[in-house]
Image (cartoon, rainbow, N blue to C red):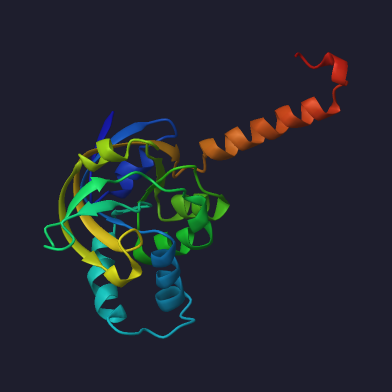
Amino acid sequence: MVELSIPLSDEAIRSLKVGDTVALSGVMITGRDTVHKWMVDTFIKKTRPPQGDDLEVYNAIKPLLHSSVIYHCGPVVAGLDTRQYKFVAAGPTTSIREEPYQGAVMDHFKVKGVIGKGGMGPKTLKACQDVPGVYLHAIGGAASLIAQTVKRVLSVYKYEFGVPEAMWVIEVKDFPAVVTMDAHGHSLHAEVEAHSKAVLQDLLTRPLESIPK
């Protein structure tokens, strides 16, 4: 297992290959659909003007995201009433929903790691090559175990988006994940999809009696 400390260097990112298992330690931020759309619409495409505390939050998160990791996660958080926050469950959410935004977010904020489940598409893969960065697959169904790697909740931004959609700034220790998209243009998800399509096409073109029952 490759031990990685956040912030991540270009050298560390380029040394990773699809299939590598990693243990991440340092500060990362959670972000899902609402956050990604807010980032792109407000600060990248600028199709909506900043409102409320948008600029304050932007200035706070930009240095935190630089050379860091964004985690597709809608956590279950205890201590909401006392603000003594503690992650109870922190499993990954499906990443492909962020495909329209992720590459632009990685480029603008210089994010070097994206964690989620299920993989992402060509826009994100290109950003992994350009920034450079990696996509890391976390273990679905292990939400409580992953939460144990979250040692502290440092702060939260855009709480008004709701607990699952807010940006939680967390310090993690030995967060486990697998590299499934690397900075060299390789995507395990694309390979599996291509292989599956080939198998399906073969089945569709074979006589019915030749297919094993």
Q: Is residue 162 visible?
A: yes
Q: What's the residue at 38%, 66% (across, down)? A: 35
Q: What's the residue at 36%, 62% (across, down)? A: 165
Examine the rendered structure and indicate whether residue 168 appears above or below residue 195.
below
> Foreground: 199 or 190?
199
Q: What's the residue at 33%, 65% (across, down)? A: 162
Q: Quadrant of the N terminus?
A: top left
Locate residue 61 relative to residue 35 in the image: left or right: left
> Foreground: 212 or 96?
212
Q: How many marks?
A: 0
Q: What's the residue at 29%, 74% (across, down)? A: 58
Locate residue 175 relative to residue 133 in the image: left or right: left
Examine the rendered structure and indicate whether residue 72 appears above or below residue 190.
below
Q: Quadrant of residue 79?
A: bottom left
> Foreground: 89 or 15?
89
- Measured as percent of width and height from the top left, residue 22 is found at 30, 35
> Foreground: 174 or 112?
174
Locate residue 137 relative to residue 66 in the image: left or right: right
- Measured as percent of width and height from the top left, residue 111 is found at 35, 57
Locate residue 146 relative to residue 20 in the image: left or right: left
